[in-house]
Amino acid sequence: MRYAWIVEHRASYAIATMCDVLSVSRSGLYGAMQRARATTKARDDARIIEEIRRAQRRHRGRYGRRRMTPEIREALGQAVNHKRIGRLMREHGLGSRKRRPFRVVTTDSRHAHPIASNVVQRDFTTTAPNQKWLADITYVRTDEGWLYLALVLDLFSRKIVGWAMSDSMPQELTIEALRVAIGGRDLSAGWHHSDRGSQYAAADYRKILRERDITVSMSRKGDCWDNALMESANGTFKVEACTASTSPRVSRRAWRSSSSSAITTPNAGTLLWGISRRYSSRGDGSKSSPHPLRPAH
């Protein structure tokens, strides 16, 4: 009680005087104050940890420190340092799920099709939807083999706007993904950037782009940085949208089959993935912006 009274009135009286009058030592007072601060900090840490657990359950364990920070600030309605959140995530095993190291070659640049110049030149800035699209092919491991996904990303909203899947990489895979994107949106006079793989350099694919006055841009040979945002989106998509696990402690596992994959990926999951997730490329970790969309058939 005496320590509490001194702390309460320390703005009005000198601490040394109050300690003398109440017959308490200053070392004892400062020790009590430190213990009180430690108790308050532990209580606050417990609240933050609980919110982190809720957020990881809600986002299937896919958020790291950068995306988790604005999430916790919104949940608690107060400022929380990102270093504190990172420390608590590490100490309690609440870090984001990591990719497993495996690689499949999806780009075959040894072909006779014409190669477009790199018009985009790593300028990934946009001011509105449907100005620049990025395209690429990625893959997911299943018990029946590799499942290939052709994806189209809108640079403004950072959403997957076109997709198709197959157990091989035929020309029709990329064309189908492009048709899904065009079926719901208008990229007239916009830019389409991809690698220089045969699927994107083929005449049928280029014809669809040419008919809509879309400028074709292709990465330089062997330079993944020219399409860095699409490469990053591929990796993030496989970790965040293509996983059956809801626990951050459970590593992602192979899908049973390519047919079961169709249930959990792009048809239903992609739009939700693009709309609800936070983007660390935006300084405030904000969520996806609205995107004009017509129903695709």
Image (cartoon, grey):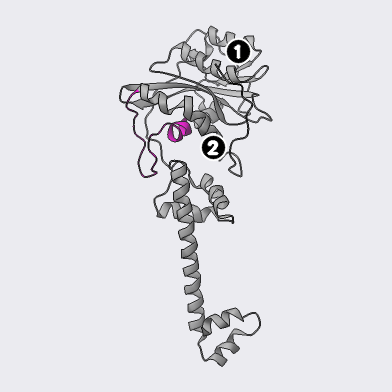
Check disc 2 and report the residue beneath it: 276
Check disc 1 and report the residue beneath it: 209
Q: Which residues are magenta?
A: 234-257
Question: Rounded to the nearest whole Å, what is the CA distance between mark 1 and mark 2?
Answer: 30 Å
Q: Are marks 1 and 2 in contact (CB under 8 Å)?
A: no
- Give the structural element (helix, strand or loop) at label 1: helix
Asked if residue 128 lies left or right of residue 274, the reply is: right
- Give the structural element (helix, strand or loop) at label 2: helix
Q: Residue 108 at what x, y percent from top left?
A: 45, 16
Residue density around tag 2, few if under 14, some if 14–19, many if 20 or more, within 10 Å: few
Q: Residue 167 at what x, y percent from top left?
A: 38, 17
First reached walking from the N terminus: tag 1 or tag 2: 1
Residue under the point 50% across and 56% down: 84
Location of residue 81 with respect to 108 vertically, above or below: below
Indicate the amino acid at tag 2.
Answer: Ser
Residue under the point 51% across and 70% down: 37
* Residue 218 in view of the camera: no
Location of residue 19 with respect to 162 vertically, above or below: below
Q: Is residue 250 magenta?
A: yes
